[in-house]
Amino acid sequence: MSIDPAIAADPVQHAPVRVPEHLGVIMDGNGRWAIARGKRRTEGHIEGVKALRNLVELCINYGVKHLTVFSFSSENWTRPREEVAFIFNLLRRFVASDLQRLIRNNVKVRIIGTREGLEPSLVRVIDDVEAKTAGNTGLVLVVAFNYGAKAEIAEATRRIAREVAAGRLSADDICEATIDAALYTAGLPDPDLIIRTSGEQRISNFLLWQAAYAEFVFVDEHWPDFDESSFVRVLETFSRRDRRFGGIGTAQK
Ligand code: FPP
């Protein structure tokens, strides 16, 4: 994790803002955005994809290196079947419509979560987008899909236990790095900043282990309304945070 994230010039206001190395986003409020406009919830998800596309560009322009977005949680299976199917199709459509643009923009895509319960054809889409962007060296776009942090930690624990049972690892050698390496996010820095839209102030099973020292910024806009000015306001808030990581902070030294 970087404790000294880059300072970038904000292209809109030319004010220096601190840019997280790894940004996490809980894209909440698509349904409410749509209902408030007399539309179907699914139309909110379509607008949500546009906001995601815009955020990817913002991250590239501002120098964010890793972006993790929560797009379908293990708990979202409790939604009406048609809405679940719609979100699954959205992932297919996003890949179909945006793959070439992602490749052109040097974006590397990683999809984290369990493949269990996904149709084989969707798993192929996921494998394909990961393979076709694997060599890219720019922004790493991590899509948390069919993801739940508790399930991720349980899976990591099973993986580590198997290593111990096979005699390849001693229980006494298990440390934080062992767990980091067994999570879906292995190799990624921890998120510096997590944004949640739509006024809710909770983490909802997103990156529980990795968010140990993340700053949280909650904004009232619904996800489809999250634009560049929202992004800049969040970066300004983040820039004012005194990140102490359990220490006493620079102001008191
Ligand atoms: C939250 O709104 C959003 C979701 C559950 C995920 C929908 C997906 C996207 C925004 C786009 C990206 C998707 C892919 C597959 C790339 P909500 O339905 O929880 O809104 P509500 O809280 O107002 O009901």
Image (tube, rainbow, N blue to C red):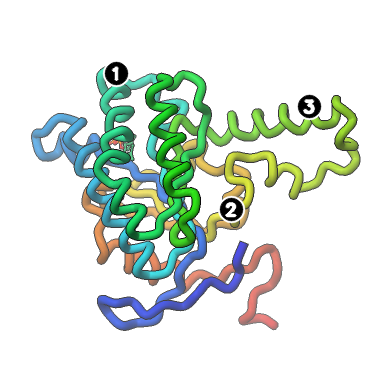
Residue 80's label in the rendered image is: 1
Q: Quadrant of the C terminus?
A: bottom right
Query: Whole-percent x and y of residue 99?
Result: 32, 46
Query: Whole-percent x and y of residue 80?
Result: 29, 18
SS assignment at label 3: helix
SS assignment at label 2: loop
Give, as a three-letter code, the residue at label 3. Answer: Arg
Side (left or right) of 143 relative to 242: left
Residue at the (81%, 31%) spot, across then down:
163
Q: Quadrant of the N terminus?
A: bottom right
- For the residue pair 100 and 118, the one nearer the viewer reads as 100
First in sequence: mark 3 or mark 1? 1
Give the answer, above or below, for where 183 lies relative to 163: below
First in sequence: mark 2 or mark 3? 3
Give, as a three-letter code, the residue at label 2. Answer: Leu
Residue at the (64%, 74%) spot, across then down:
249
Q: Nearer the viewer, mark 3 or mark 1?
A: 3
Residue 23 seen in the current view: no
Q: Quadrant of ligand 1?
A: top left
Q: Furthest residue to the left? A: 38
Residue 182's label in the rendered image is: none
SS assignment at label 1: loop
Q: Residues within 10 Å of mark 2 (few under 14, many from 20)?
A: some
Side (left or right) of 199 relative to 158: left
Give the answer, above or below, for where 65 lies relative to 204: below
Residue 162's label in the rendered image is: 3
Q: Which residue is mark 2?
A: 188
Query: Whole-percent x and y of residue 63?
Result: 42, 69
Query: Whole-percent x and y of residue 62?
Result: 38, 70
Alpha carbons under labels 2 and 3: distance apart: 23 Å
